[in-house]
Amino acid sequence: MFESAVMISIKPTWCDRIFTFKDKNLELRKSYPKALRPPFVAFVYCAAKEYRVTDVIHKGDRIWNDDDIYDGDTPIFIKVPDSPAHMMGHEKKVIGKIIVDRIYEVDWKDGKSYLDGREMVREDDIHTCVSVKEFKKYQRGGKVYGWHIQEAEKFIKDRELSMFGLKRPPQSWQYLRASDPWDKEETDGKVD
């Protein structure tokens, strides 16, 4: 049983990298739970699936076959789910937990990555799985913290947010209290 923990929302793509491929061990956030000392538990809410636009149909475009022409004034956006196959059906559920054993301040400058002001080296074995462009877009001149994932456990059966005393998922993360319903149940172990 844990005295306190957090719920963290993570996009399906990153859930896949954490739980399936296990190649992402640093989750980037603009804040961290200052009331908890590592190691602490973060239950993972797999956020809603993302979509990407694959095509746009405009007035006058041919559709279906050469005889049909779209005559509407509003463009039609053709979207497909952009969630990894391993995460299909797990979106909008609590799918597991991670043990966060360290919080780093992460920075990128002069073409180099830094952890707590020290240049990151290969031996650190730290993997965010984000590109420099993605990092800079997220950073926008502010501080970024890396939640180091010591261990990741995927639940055998996904859980509803209500089990954790939540009505809606956090935008980034939020504290859970020991008095919330999640503390009354044991986790069902490692899978995958």
Image (tube, helix red, strand yellow):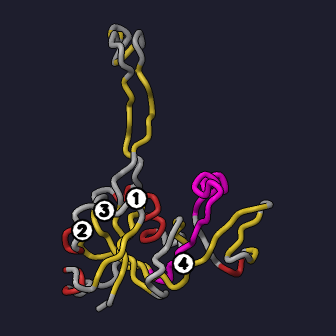
> Badges 4 and 2: C-beta atoms under 8 Å apart?
no
Q: Amino acid at mark 1?
A: Pro
Q: Which residues are magenta?
A: 129-151
Q: Earlier in the sequence, mark 4 or mark 2?
A: 4
Read off the residue under disc 2. Answer: 166
Q: Are marks 1 and 3 in contact (CB under 8 Å)?
A: no
User: Which is in the foreground here, disc 4 or disc 2?
Assistant: 2
Q: CA distance from mark 1 to mark 3?
A: 14 Å
Eye-nearest disc, 2 or 1: 2
User: What residue would you read off at disc 4?
Assistant: 148
- Inspect the image, locate mark 2, and give the three-letter code of the amino acid beneath it: Leu
The reply to whether the C-beta atoms of the residues labelled 3 and 2 are less than 8 Å apart is yes
- Type of the residue with mark 3: Pro
Q: Which residue does the image show at 37% across and 45% down from the upper left? A: 81
Q: Quadrant of the C terminus?
A: bottom left
Which residue is under mark 3?
A: 169
Answer few, some or many: residues within 10 Å of disc 2's Cα (few below 14, many 20 plus, some between 14 and 19). some
Q: Secondary structure at mark 3?
A: loop
